[in-house]
Image (cartoon, rainbow, N blue to C red):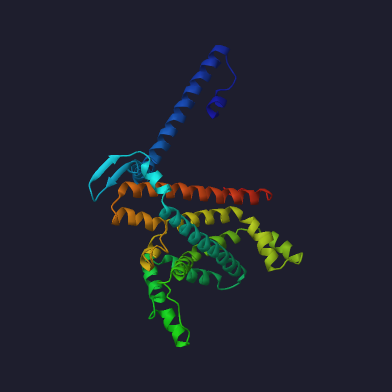
Amino acid sequence: MTILKEVGTAGPPALLEQRRAEARSIAQTTDWSRSVKYATFLLPSVALICCVMLYPLGYAVYSSLFNYDLGSGTHDLIGLDNYVTLLGEARFWAALGRTSLIVTCAVTSEFFIGLFVAYGLYQLVRGGRVLSLLMFLPHIVTPVVAALFLRWIFMGRWGLLSSILISFNIFPPDWLGDPNWARFTVVVADIWQFTPFIILVLLAALNTVDESLIEAAKLDGAGHWTLLFRILVPSVWPIIAFVLVIRVMDAFRSFDNIYVLTAGGPGTATETLTMYTYTTAFKLLKIGKASALGVLTLVFVGCVALAVITVLSRLSRGRGRSVI
């Protein structure tokens, strides 16, 4: 457009049209050069994404169509039989139910704890940054190391927590040996490790809210509860949607804590979809079935993430905000 404007309107019509045609050609060449330059910059990133994401996903979908068994050496094309077998297995649906239960309890607890703690840090005049840094430390620890630390705390009769309870003449439960308490321990481990992430994100979101809204609400006599849920939370709906979707997707693929704490036990009490996939692939050596299980997990997680975004979009529609 700049080149065409520089051509002007002076001169004979034929010469003017020739100049305009030359200007269009130069503009098209410039646009093409820019596209090639931008594509050159994007090419390494696209190639990396294809290598580390698209190729493994495509190979997993491909492997799921085969009866691929490393133990017997079979590699026969069976189409969608692996998916049909999994969808007809009670163990698959039980693992899906346990995964959904653990994810729901963990993410819900993490969100509300993170929200209240972030609001408390938001209200602090001094020391908020130091406290937020200290609270973020559990999230920095390597998941396996954190799980080993928690296993030492919850271990049987000689774990730290059990020893403390026994010193007060309180008989502790078998934290990792009882099915119900084992699920509770897995949820607590996830809350301990990932709540700092939610605190940090929500605290950053609360600090972006317009101060004039806060001051106006305080002048109208709004208390902490009203200020939080009527002013602050509606103002940061997009960030809430982001953190919930990220945590739900991350919680569904959680493996380290469960493997170190309970290894899916006792029995199958804490066997989630990721643990079931691990058992199928690396213990039973059924690669085709494990690949199908991974694909089904991906589809289910995608549907859950879409449902979370849809629900939050409807909640925020009346406020004139979008969560995506």
x then y, percent, for residue 107: 52, 61
**Residue 64 as seen in the image, left or right of residue 109:** left
Q: Position of residue 200 (x, y in %)?
A: 52, 63
**Residue 81 occupies which quadrant of the picture?**
top left
Residue lying furthest right in this view? 220
Which residue does the image show at 47% across and 87% down from the upper left?
169
Q: Is residue 62 above or below residue 107?
A: above
Q: Quadrant of the N terminus?
A: top right
Pick whichever, 293 or 301, lies toward us. 293
How many marks the image carries: the answer is 0
The residue drawn where x is 24% and y is 44% is: 74
In front here: 186 or 98?
98
For residue 70, side relative to residue 310 (left or right): left
User: Is 296 above or below relative to 5?
Assistant: below
- Residue 15 in view in this figure: yes
**Residue 188: x %, y % from top left:** 48, 69
- Residue at (51, 19) in percent of width and height: 21
The front one of 97 and 188 is 97
Is residue 180 placed above or below 255 in the rendered structure? below
Q: Is residue 211 visible?
A: no
Name the image quarter holding residue 114. Answer: bottom right
The residue under the point 40% across, 48% down is: 86
Q: Quadrant of residue 225?
A: bottom right
